[in-house]
Image (tube, rainbow, N blue to C red):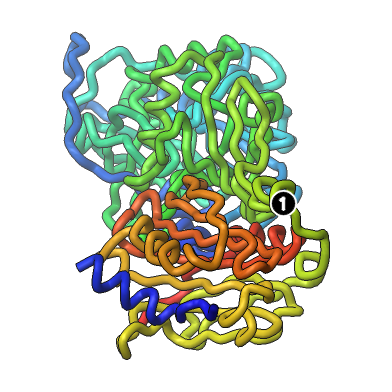
Amino acid sequence: MKRLSFVFIIFILIQIACGKSSSVSEGEIQTAIARTQAAIPTEFVTAAPTAETTAKSTPASAPTEAVTQDALEKIRSATVQIEATGSFVDPELGNLYNAGGRGTGVIIDPSGIAVTNNHVVTGAATLKVWLEGETEPRNATVLGASECWDLAVIDIQGEDFPYLEFSDVEVSPGLEVYAAGFPLGDPEYTLTKGIVSKANANGETYWASVKGVLEHDSRIRSGNSGGPLVDMQGNIVGINYAANDQTDQNFAIRTKDAQSVIETLRSGKDFESIGINGQAVMSDDGTLSGIWVSSVKSGSPADKTGVKGGDMITRMEGLVLATDGTMADYCDVLRTRKPEDTLSIEVLRFADQEYLTGQLNGRTLETSFSFANELGSESGTETGAAGNGENVLVQDDEGAIEVSIPASWSQVDGSNWVSDDEVIGSSITAAADVDRFLNTYEEPGVFFGVSDQLAKLGGYIQVLDVYRDNFRSDCKNKGRFDYEDSAFEGAYDVYENCSGSRNTMVVLSARPIVNKTSLLVTIMFNSMTDSDLDVLDEILRTFDVVGSLP
């Protein structure tokens, strides 16, 4: 019996129903990140009211006298430039080997203890520190770091250093402040003057989660990261970490809140950290989000679990991360656990186009799902042909969707997905012989369809039920199983021995986890060998929405 056409099956679904599950490519993630950050993320933070501090201290007002020359010299001599060199994964440029970036730090102890930002130093292979009046850099080691607070403490080689102390006053709007550092990586020291404009701005950003920060107009730029914001007496009131050039807003982590964190880091312990240099990212359509990892600290929980630069952490403890474009959820998970607790983690690894699961402080990352592993040993099919050759990336006729298939599947139909003369989405049908794939059960091949209309009319269960009714008389139904990876949720049905064939057919329908009603993806795959199931795994790793649906 010929199988019903895809057009008729979807027509039935529309009649009884009265989501685009999008696989997001690395390119889309790169675009999203590039739009919101530069190489060192010191460009943006949303300013919004947060809970006022309840700590009791003496309010500070703007001094009536100018800062003394001694204070200016003290600030200059205790502010250092830091160069971090190592291998990082840049979302736009890819792998960067032996790459260097520069930030700022401030010495807080004569022994050479200095504070800077986590994003300046974490994951670096070497740290070099330039001091005022010295032409050769000194080496430094990282004692502790926190990606949630975007703070790190380093130990500079040497002793008897000039240093600054933390201010013990409560900072209020109008307080005159100075920002010291080395903007844009320039080796020449820079000092800018302004006032505190907001004492408790929102500290949730795409690379940190600080409960409250200072907003000021003492201009800072990329390269000022980790440098001190000081009062007129030369005492530290904040650690600069963010700026918005367009609105001329500048932000510093309040040292009044951060001192206990700094003390923990100074003792050699990380705090609210798994050991990554990362930032929250989200695809344009909101269907995929997570924490992009540009580098990993050796020996950290992330490193021991197998997280690598270029990975994107999509879930921790089952919670989808960065759905609001910030690190808030990620850090909240860490704040509700002890550092030694075991945490489940899911990772999207773009380099290998695969989803991985594992545990921090537990089992290492491994491939989360494989149809070849799940079905190959049970299908009774032979090992052979389609999965052993070269793959090619193909698109539909409109350039809206794409998927990787074996080069031997030379016949590709990329026409629109149509039902009852109405276009409902984009589709790709591919096989060595498309007509034989569509009308028999003897030909390996794939149908891949994406529709935003079906997402509004029904769900993946309805799609699967329509196919099940169609195949019920021809095939042995092996059952329905849940499907979930780092970006999608759905289900799949497995059929065997259709019309006496020795085939295994998988019908999968899924929707995005984050934006459940935006799209619905349907994949029907027919295999004749275990090797064909490897092709299905490749299809699931590579299918993507790259343009606008019709």
Q: Quadrant of residue 103?
A: top right
Q: Residue at left 31%, top 26%?
A: 232
Give the quadrant of the C terminus: bottom left
In terms of depth relative to the viewer, which is nearer, 463 or 107?
463
On screen, residue 149 above or below 421: above
Residue on which the image places disc 1: 376
Q: Taking the image as drawn, is residue 104 in sight?
A: no
On screen, residue 426 above or below 147: below
Q: Residue at left 24%, top 73%?
A: 15
Which percent across, then down, holds residue 4? 46, 78
Decide: few, some or many residues near mark 1? Use Cα within 10 Å; few <14, some 14-19, many ≥20: many
Which percent across, then down, holds residue 337? 44, 17
* Position of residue 468 in the picture relative to residue 10 (left or right): right
Which percent across, then down, holds residue 142? 64, 24
* Position of residue 83 in the picture relative to residue 429 (left or right): right
In terms of depth relative to the viewer, which is nearer, 138 or 419?
419
* Position of residue 21 in the picture relative to residue 386 (left or right): left
